[in-house]
Amino acid sequence: MESAILKTEGLSAYYEDNQVVKNINLSIPEFKITAIMGPSGCGKSTLVRCFNRMHEMVPGARIEGKVFLKEENVYDMESITVRTRIGMVFQRPNPFPMMTIRDNVIAGYILNGIKLNRSKSDDIVKQSLKEAALWDEVKDYLHKRGTFLSGGQQQRLCIARALAVKPDVLLFDEPTSALDPKATSHIEGLMADLKNTVTIILVTHNIAQAGRVSDFIAFLYLGELVEFGPKGRLLTTPKDKRTEEFLTGKFG
């Protein structure tokens, strides 16, 4: 197994008394794409929201266990630091509607009161948009609002925003579910390029998508980690009957 960048030990997550993630031990390899798969309601999104401490923002939510980013427990770190180092891209594109494309990219600096000189911010904007494969499409429109873009472009703008603060890990929570096939293909290709510099964790219920882009797959069912392994093995010879039944469409 490649070196792990993110590890969980006995991780459980609750909403009030309802346990939705159950005692998960998982090691996420660095500079790979790990897909978190499973049927709707199995705890996928809750699990990744524990990684960057977004779960605790829900009233009545709590966790047990530990999450380590490069050997450091994220629950011992400042939450803002955690969410900078573990960025997130959501199901629906969510550029800040009152901000320009340029300001959307550097929003992480603006909102945290980090001052950048013009030259530095220009460099970050250009580099981040290039990494998100969006620069050529928007370079002449940086002072227009982000909401002026198409859905697929807005999602790539959100990816640029997450990349701008130089994260170690990027969480993608069903990032293409609101996009058409062409925009979906664009995002999938982008993820494949990005894994050279950032570790990606992809929440998806789409088996074909996991097959196209992931290196490793974790299969969740009813809040439990059923199995985890290289994509090729897990998709072709799953060890657990529940994984096999999900892959063959018996449920999900």
Image (cartoon, rainbow, N blue to C red):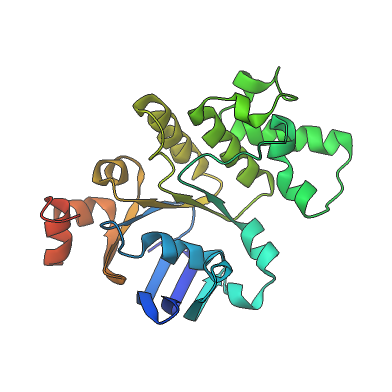
Left or right: 201, with 113 as reference point? left
Depth check, front residue: 174 or 194: 174
Position above or below: 131 against 232: above
Query: In which quadrant is the C terminus drawn?
Result: bottom left
- Which percent across, then down, holds residue 148? 61, 24
Hey, which quadrant is residue 238 in on the image?
A: bottom left
Left or right: 207, with 196 as reference point? left
Depth check, front residue: 58 or 233: 58
- Which percent across, then down, holds residue 21? 37, 73
Hey, which quadrant is residue 125 in on the image?
A: top right
Residue 73 in view? no
Q: Residue at x 31, y 41 (%)?
A: 209
Depth check, front residue: 12 or 125: 12
Q: Residue at x 57, y 41 (%)?
A: 94
* Count of numbered labels shown in the rendering: 0
Position above or below: 139 against 245: above
Query: In which quadrant is the N terminus drawn?
Result: bottom left
Q: Residue at x 46, y 62 (%)?
A: 48
